[in-house]
Every structure is written in structure tokens, then in C-alpha cells.
Amino acid sequence: MKRHFFHTLGAALLAAALLAPAGCALRRQEPPPDPALLPANAAAPYHEAALMHFKEGREFMSQGRYELARESFLLALAAADNGDMRVLATRELETADRMIRSVR
């Protein structure tokens, strides 16, 4: 009798351990998309000019053209009508400034 109980308990624990990760995967939430990576036809809560300048600034950063990136981020910050976009543009502007100082 004891043996049967422990086998049943062991099987139940094994089944629970195997099924637990599958349940966690179903609840995983994706982070919000980066505004610079949104497709052209996607609806965005950001001003169109701010998004355009932000994306342009990111492209300049990837090319190592930090002063042009800085100007683009300033334009994105000026056109931003959303607090989140202002935070993103300010952060990228500070990054461009640091890169300009490190190159000099």
C-alpha cells in the first residue's frame, strides 16, 4: 500500500514539474516595441515628425555619425508631443553627446 502511494505521488509530482514550464510560457508578455522599429503603416501614439527624426538619429548613430544623430534627436525632442518620446529622445541625445565627447 505504501509503495503504491509513493509511486502515485511521484508520478503526480513529475507531471506537475513537466507541465509547470508550459503554463509559464503561455503567460509571457512581450515588451512594447521600440518606436524606431515600427513599420511605416503602423499606428503609433507618437508624432510622425518625431518618429522620423528619431529613426534617422538611430541610423546616424549606427553609422558613427554622432553629430548628425545629435541634431536628429534634438529635432525629435522638439517635435515630441508625448512624454515617452521625450524621454527616449533625451536618452538618445545624451548617448550621442557622450559618443561625441569620447571621439574628441
Image: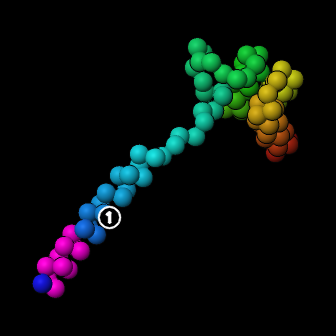
Q: Where is residue 100 in the image (x, y as percent from the top left)?
A: 83, 38
Q: Position of residue 13 (x, y in %)?
A: 28, 69
Q: In this view, does 4 lie above or below 32?
A: below
**Residue occupied by mark 1:** 17
Q: In this view, does 57 lie above or below 9?
A: above
From the viewer's perspective, is 96 left or right of 26? right
From the viewer's perspective, is 102 left or right of 36? right
Pick the residue in front: 46 or 71: 46
Q: Quadrant of the N terminus?
A: bottom left
Residue 17 in view of the camera? yes
What kind of residue is marked 1? Ala
- Quadrant of the rendered image containing residue 56: top right
Pick the residue in front: 90 or 81: 81
Give me the residue at 21% from left, 69% from top.
11
Is 9 covered by the magenta stretch?
Answer: yes
Give me the residue at 73% from left, 23% from top.
46
- Quadrant of the rendered image containing residue 84: top right
SS at badge 1: helix
Give me the residue at 26% from left, 63% from top.
15
Is 23 covered by the magenta stretch?
Answer: no
Q: In which quarter of the image is the C terminus?
A: top right
The magenta segment: 2-11
Q: Where is residue 42 in the image (x, y as percent from the top left)?
A: 59, 18
- Quadrant of the rendered image containing residue 97: top right
Main secondary structure of the magenta stretch? helix
Pick the residue in front: 12 or 72: 12
Give me the residue at 76% from left, 19% from top.
47
